[in-house]
Image (tube, rainbow, N blue to C red):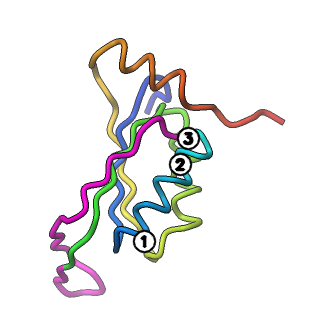
Amino acid sequence: MEKNGFAIVFITTSADEESQLIARVLIEQRKAACVNIIPSVCSVFWWQNKIDQDNESLLIVKTRFELLDEVIRLVKEVHSYDVPEIIALPVIGGNHDYLEWIDNEVIPEEVE
């Protein structure tokens, strides 16, 4: 998939504290312009050959698509799940001023 443009990344977590930590890491590292935290979602899923259910928090991360690999790496470093949900969707349109703001707030990986 093309790495230009913007992405919305969904991440689920086990608790509010973990959501706050991940949001802070992404913002402090300038890999996201904004992270919304929805504190309580009910997730029903297959896990280890059975149906499981849990209350989780949902993060909605606004970033540039080119930073997705870095976002995934950072989240996996601090996330408590063995297989964290990190799913990105391309942004196909929106308020130009808001998208420009995202563009100005995130910083791409430094080239060494």
Q: Is residue 63 above or below residue 96?
A: below
Residue at point 36%, 62% (across, down): 85
Q: Which amino acid, mark 3? A: Lys
- Residue type beneath disc 1: Val
Viewer-nearest residue: 86 or 37: 37
Where does the image place residue 75, in percent across and percent down from the top left?
Answer: 51, 59
Task: Tell me if residue 46 comes above or below residue 111 in the rendering.
Answer: below
Q: Secondary structure at mark 1?
A: loop
Per the image, the residue denoted by label 1 is 83
Q: Earlier in the sequence, mark 3 or mark 1?
A: 3
Question: Helix, strand or loop at disc 2?
Answer: helix
Residue at image mark 3: 31
What residue do we see at 46% from left, 53% from top?
23
Q: Main secondary structure of the magenta part?
A: strand
Is 106 left or right of 18, judged from the image as shown? right
Return the disc, 3 or 2, that comes first in the chain's sequence: 2
Residue pictured at 35% horizontal, 51% vertical: 87
Disc 1 residue crowd, few under 14, some 14–19, many 20+, Cα 10 Å: few
The crowd level at tag 3 (other Cα within 10 Å; few <14, some 14-19, many 20+) is many
Measure the C-alpha gap from mark 3 to mark 2.
5 Å
- The kind of secondary structure element at disc 3 is loop
Mark in front: 1 vs 2? 2
Residue named by callout 2? 26
Picture layout, residue 68 above or below residue 107: below
For the N terminus, which image quadrant? Answer: top left
43 or 22, nearer to the observer: 22
Q: CA distance from mark 3 to mark 1?
A: 21 Å
Residue for point 18% across, 65% down: 41
Q: Which residues are magenta?
A: 31-53
Residue 23 relative to residue 14: left or right: right
* Residues at discs 3 and 2 in contact (Cβ within 8 Å): yes
